């Protein structure tokens, strides 16, 4: 089809053309970036933690009038309270396994430090790899459902205990595969010696687990997979336990665990909301902000696309009404219905194409702005290309209704009121 | 004349109901999306204590030296909190009008009635000047005095929620409560108080929190009874000694600090005092680096700590983009609508109406569309804020609310935006040549 008549007609409607093109450009820029935000958030939320997340409970409690964790006698008393709780929980019906632990993936309560190949390195230092510590016992791996890929688990005899502010370092540790690769890019990590928190005590890696996410959400993304497992029960006035239940019995155990613990020893506090948490709830809470952002961006995209489509329908309808007589003349001179339809479709394709070219520049510019101000990542090129295809398609869909009405203008219009 | 234009506008809008409804919908959705984002942004970027935020300052001291720097996101600032040694030195020197070191405690409270489980509470160990400095609102009683701090008295200020739980909301001043196994005399009960962001302890809350403090205990008393720090601790080296005592001797930072300075002279004097203090530490050999301190007032400190979540800013930016698209759209639709009436304009102009009359007529029409869109926008903003409560984290979502100023702003934005969008179409309408239109009719 000859483009000349279209261009000539567009020149008469400069303002309308500019407004539609501008709208398409802005829509493209915003939708590309919003969809990129949605995708990054969903990708983040879907990362597996490395745990077997079903049928897993975390119990957090605090003893009242607890012995002090500051002296050796108090620490041993606290440890015996802790072991009583482990025993109480493991005797509950439907409980498969119980372990002591200081935190869990995504809980946002973390104990972090440095791990280095040389003794005595300062903690905020490039020789030190930032890691999150999990203190627990020999049942920790099985209860969490971690997969051991090299070496072995801790044995019951290797588990020690210490007060929460005792600075002594363990002689044995298990690390995640990512951390092992970071420390020893070329060798097997099992059997190697490392130093924790800048101390001079050598710690030997005895095992490597496939994956375990750190508790830090948001601020800890740069060391999310660098976890270190330590064979130590931490003694403090409060304690945490992980409980793996039989399949399908999670809710039953979650309901009765509090009462069972109170029954065994009433001098304690178990918080009503955060005392006993299913792992699914911990995950939902950790990622609520990310999912919320994804939903908000999704709603904005939908509104934006609907508004733009409505705008195109509105303006094109106006043009069809304005050119009623010209369309009649064309039809009378032999143009087929399909020619009229194509005319409007092609016209929209040109306007939307022009707008989309500006939109690509805007989309990249907006992404750069978000990167510099808000630490966002660089948007891959295919987002822009898919966005381009989407707005062009949107334009064609929106223009179809008024264009078909235009094609239905009868030739006889040409003979009236001239 | 105004009545006549209103009448004309309503007739014109009724003539093409489809287009009118479309414009109202577009304005409504655009305004609602941006106002919903704005309400969240307003909530998290607000000043928690506007009447004196410019008098509250957070001192930061370079107490780690160069080894505290060089990590991710390091901007040359000293640590955000203080170690015990320096916090105590600043308290002893007492150079500000009010000052308080503080740390988070999380003791257990055992109710007097038998049969009730012990309650886990959170709170802060603070100095007596904390209360006048933060203007904490008292329902009964007051804070303790300097002598209580010195004598490490077993006194406590409790929050409204804990007072409700333990004493049924009655005046409990003078009664005792059992905190971690020891009796404390209640000297004050606060009103419901949960400033957002939690300006006095950004170190531990990061800004926003759903919980409120249940207990406040004299700082030195809490140290004496070994009530351990339940907040964040950050170390540049492993403490040499174990235990809470070891933490107090270490260079680890875990204490939040705030001072009140009422005028520029006092601020300058305090700044000089901090530098003098750091230089003194340098001379004594404790710091091997020159002074590098910060003394930011509260708004500057909240900004430096990035208290407003990034997501909130991005949402607001995107929502403003959406509003812009809606305006461009409305401009296009108004253009179509106005130019369709070229004939009518031609007749009016030929009969002697000046351009200003055309302006008035069409801008009023745009204003009516804007007002209607604004009313729809109000409804949608209400739904939006309700929806935000479902999808955003509770600490943020709880803060977003509808109030009169938001309602007025919504209407204002809708009307102003639509009238702005109507300016170009109106300009085009006023340029219609009467002769042309009359000829073709």
Image (tube, coloured by chain):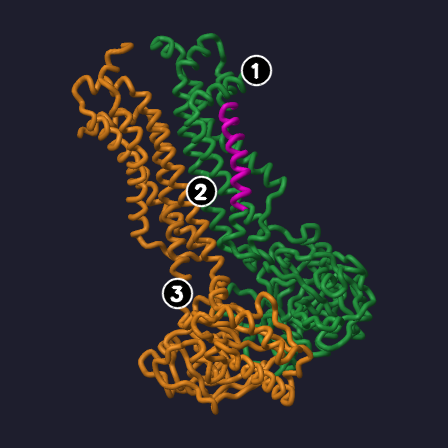
Front one among B148 and B138: B138
Q: How crowded is mark 1: few (under 14 residues within 10 Å), some or many (20 or more)?
A: few
Who's the residue at 43% across and 70% down the image?
A: A53
Q: Mark 1 points at which residue?
A: B1
Say which of B333 and A261 sits in front: A261
Image colour for chain B is green
Residue B8, position in %: x, y?
A: 50, 17
Q: Is mark 2 on a helix, strand or loop?
A: helix
Report which residue position mark 3 lands on: A47
Q: Would you place residue A353 above or below residue B112 in this image?
A: above
Task: For label 3, count other residues whose C-alpha is less than 10 Å away and answer few (under 14), some (14-19) or many (20+).
Answer: few
| Farthest residue, direction bottom | A157
Asked if both marks, 1 and 2, belong to the same chain, the answer given is yes
- Residue matched to label 2: B321
Classify residue A12 by image quadrant: top left
Q: Distance between the residues labelled 1 and 2?
A: 37 Å
Give the letter of the chain under mark 3. Answer: A
The quadrant of the picture occupied by the C terminus of chain A is top left
Chain part drawn in magenta: B364-385
Judged from the image, the secondary structure of the residue bearing numbered disc 1 is loop
Taking the magenta stretch, the answer to whether it contains residue A407 is no
| Residue drawn at point x = 50 percent, y = 28 percent | B369
Residue at image position (59%, 47%) is B401
Instruction: Please name the color used to draw chain A.
Output: orange
Front position in the image: B286 or B238: B238
Q: Which chain carries label 1?
A: B
| Crowd rating for badge 2 (residues with CA inside 10 Å; few <14, some 14–19, many 20+) | many
- Image coordinates for residue B428, horizontal then vertical, percent: 42, 22
């Amino acid at each position: 089809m000859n483009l000349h008549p279209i261009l000539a007609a567009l020149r008469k409607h400069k303002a309308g053309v500019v407004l539609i093109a501008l709208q398409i450009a802005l829509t493209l820029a915003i939708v590309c970036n919003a969809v990129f935000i949605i995708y990054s958030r969903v990708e983040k939320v879907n990362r597996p933690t490395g745990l077997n997340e079903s049928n897993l409970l975390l119990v957090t409690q605090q003893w009242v009038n607890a012995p002090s964790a500051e002296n050796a006698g108090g620490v041993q008393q606290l440890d015996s309270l802790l072991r009583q709780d482990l025993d109480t929980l493991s005797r509950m019906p439907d409980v498969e396994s119980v372990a002591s632990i200081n935190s869990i993936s995504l809980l946002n309560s973390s104990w972090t430090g440095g791990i280095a190949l040389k003794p005595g390195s300062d903690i905020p230092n490039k020789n030190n790899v930032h890691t999150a510590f999990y203190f627990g016992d020999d049942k920790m791996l099985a209860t969490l459902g971690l997969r051991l890929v090299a070496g072995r688990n801790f044995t019951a005899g290797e588990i020690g205990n210490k007060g929460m502010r005792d600075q002594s370092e363990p002689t044995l540790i298990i690390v995640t595969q990512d951390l092992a690769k970071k420390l020893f890019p070329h060798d097997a990590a099992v059997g190697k010696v490392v130093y924790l928190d800048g101390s001079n005590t050598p710690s030997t890696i005895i095992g490597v687990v496939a994956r375990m996410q750190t508790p830090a959400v948001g601020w800890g993304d740069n060391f999310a997979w660098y976890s270190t497992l330590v064979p130590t029960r931490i003694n403090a006035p409060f304690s945490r336990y992980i409980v793996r239940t039989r399949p399908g019995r999670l809710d039953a155990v979650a309901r009765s665990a509090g009462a069972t613990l109170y029954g065994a020893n009433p001098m304690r506090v178990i918080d009503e909301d955060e005392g006993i948490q299913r792992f699914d709830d911990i995950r939902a809470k950790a990622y609520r902000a990310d999912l919320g952002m994804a939903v908000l961006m999704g709603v904005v995209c939908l509104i934006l696309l609907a508004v733009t489509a409505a705008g195109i329908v509105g303006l094109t309808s106006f043009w069809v009404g304005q050119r009623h007589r010209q369309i009649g003349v064309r039809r009378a001179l032999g143009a087929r219905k399909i020619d009229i339809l194509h005319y409007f479709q092609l016209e929209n394709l040109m306007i939307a194409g022009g707008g989309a070219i500006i939109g690509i520049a805007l989309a990249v510019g907006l992404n750069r702005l978000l990167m510099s101000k808000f630490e966002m990542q660089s948007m891959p090129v295919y987002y822009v290309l898919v966005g381009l295809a989407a707005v062009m398609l949107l334009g064609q869909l929106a223009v179809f209704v008024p264009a078909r009405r235009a094609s239905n203008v009868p030739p006889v219009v040409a003979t009236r009121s001239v | 004349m105004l009545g006549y234009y209103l009448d004309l506008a309503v007739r014109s809008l009724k003539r093409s109901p489809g287009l009118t409804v479309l414009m109202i919908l577009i304005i409504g959705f655009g305004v609602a999306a941006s106002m919903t984002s704005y309400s969240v942004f307003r909530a998290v970027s607000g000043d928690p204590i506007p009447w004196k935020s410019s008098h509250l300052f957070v001192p930061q001291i370079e107490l780690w030296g160069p080894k505290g720097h060089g990590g991710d996101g390091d901007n040359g600032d000293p640590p955000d909190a203080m170690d015990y040694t320096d916090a105590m030195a600043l308290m002893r020197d007492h150079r500000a009008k009010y000052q308080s070191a503080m740390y988070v405690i999380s003791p257990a409270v055992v109710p007097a009635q038998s049969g009730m489980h012990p309650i886990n509470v959170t709170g802060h160990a603070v100095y007596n000047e904390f209360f006048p400095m933060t203007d904490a609102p008292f329902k009964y009683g007051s804070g303790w005095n300097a002598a209580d701090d010195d004598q490490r008295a077993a006194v406590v200020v409790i929050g409204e929620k804990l007072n409700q739980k333990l004493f049924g909301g009655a005046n409990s001043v003078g009664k005792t409560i059992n905190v971690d196994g020891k009796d404390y005399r209640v000297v004050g009960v606060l009103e419901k108080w949960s400033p957002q962001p939690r300006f006095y302890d950004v170190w531990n809350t990061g800004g926003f929190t759903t919980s409120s403090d249940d207990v406040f205990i004299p700082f030195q008393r809490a140290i004496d009874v070994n009530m351990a720090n339940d907040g964040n601790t950050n170390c540049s080296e492993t403490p040499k000694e174990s235990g809470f005592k070891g933490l107090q001797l270490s260079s680890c930072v875990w204490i939040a600090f705030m001072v009140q300075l009422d005028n520029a002279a006092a601020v300058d004097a305090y700044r000089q005092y901090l530098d003098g203090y750091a230089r003194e530490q340098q001379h004594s050999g404790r710091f091997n680096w020159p002074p590098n301190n910060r003394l930011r007032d509260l708004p500057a400190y909240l900004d430096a700590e990035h208290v407003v979540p990034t997501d909130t800013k991005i949402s607001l930016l995107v929502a403003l983009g959406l509003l812009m698209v809606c305006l461009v759209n409305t401009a296009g639709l108004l253009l179509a609508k106005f130019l369709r009436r070229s004939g009518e304009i031609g007749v009016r102009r030929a009969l002697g109406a000046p351009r200003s009359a055309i302006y008035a007529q069409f801008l009023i029409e745009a204003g009516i569309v804007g007002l209607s869109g604004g009313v729809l926008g109000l409804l949608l903003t209400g739904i939006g804020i309700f929806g935000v409560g479902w999808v955003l984290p509770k600490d943020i979502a709880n803060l977003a609310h509808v109030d009169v100023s938001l309602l007025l702003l919504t209407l204002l934005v809708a009307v102003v935006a639509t009238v702005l969008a109507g300016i170009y179409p109106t300009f085009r309408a006023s340029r219609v040549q009467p002769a042309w239109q009359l000829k073709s009719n």
